[in-house]
Image: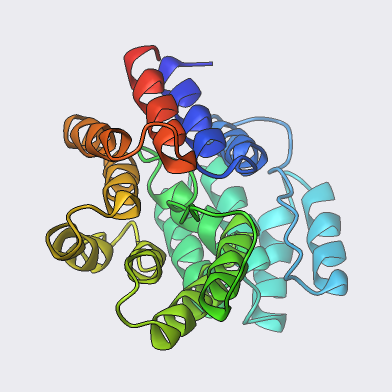
Amino acid sequence: MSARVKVWIVVGLAATGAAGTVVGVTLATRSDVQRQSSKPPPFAADPTARPEVAQQVREALKAWPAGTARRLRILAARYPHSALVQLELGLALALSGEQADALRAWQAAERVQPDSPSAVRAQDLRHPGSAPGLPPFVPSFTQATNVVQAHLLRGSAYQQALRPVSAEREFLAAVQAAPNDPEALTAAAVGRYDKDRPALAFSQLGPLSRRFPHAQTVRFHLGLLLIYFGDIARARRELALARAQGPRTPLGKRAETLLKAGRNP
């Protein structure tokens, strides 16, 4: 395992405490795509896929290498709104050396069913140089005491399930309930992060650091997004500021963990 991969896994664990499995699945999928093999493409389970679709995808993978891509193309026509089918079709095409068609399949996965693990994994495969998954919102609390926090916890749970659209919906509901709450506004900004258009999140989160200069959540998440964006130097500065605003708080401790991961990859 490379030093870079270790840092990504630490990022996932430090951020959510439950993202390590997601990171591991994505990295395993990536490594399989990096090399042609006699083995079929890996099956990436997706709870949002209909059971009959998932079963037919599994059957198509068993036909590797001769019939898998053809069967998956048939399934893509039969189930045009299935991100799982498009993800696996892209994997089969990539392992067959058809990179351009693989990219188109992964883009289709994101387009037809964006609120699914398959769509998130497809975006990861199109951006192999970035950290797996999407940057998570990390609540500063563990139990909700009001409606705003309830929305934030539900949004965080959706993120961990790789359901970004549902997560963003919950975060926006939190903002509607408390339009001046820095934590709700931060969550909404983080929920907009897209690897093709990272400015969607940064354009909201950056101004929050000026509007709420003492809000630890803003600095922590700005540092987290910068890690995903690949700007480690700026990420360290923001995480150091977050830690300084409360080193013994849950976010302060997570910031310290991320800072240590950056020093000791």
Query: Depth check: 163 or 29 in front?
Result: 163
At x 35%, y 44%, the residue is: 224
Q: Quadrant of the C terminus?
A: top left
Above or below, comparing residue 135 to residue 107 in the picture: above
Q: Quadrant of residue 31?
A: top right
Compare residues 220 and 40 and report the one nearer the observer: 220
Which of the 4 quarters of the picture holds residue 249? top left
Left or right of 26 in this view: 263:
left
Q: Quadrant of residue 73?
A: bottom right
Quarter of the image with the N terminus is top right
Residue 58, image x, y percentages = 83, 56
Give 81 or 70, whichever is nearer the viewer: 81
- Residue 250 % position (x, y): 49, 40
Scheme by which the image is coloured: rainbow
Q: Is residue 181 rendered to the left or right of residue 34?
A: left
Percent across and percent down for residue 12 are: 52, 38
Give the side of residue 140 with respect to residue 260, left or right.
right
Total label count? 0
Q: Residue at x 37, y 61 (%)?
A: 190
Which residue in the rendered view is the most extreme toward the top? 264
- Residue at the location (32% across, 34% down)? 243
| Up/down of 171 relative to 98, above or below | below
Percent of width and height locating residue 189: 32, 67
Q: Is residue 19 above or below residue 199?
A: above
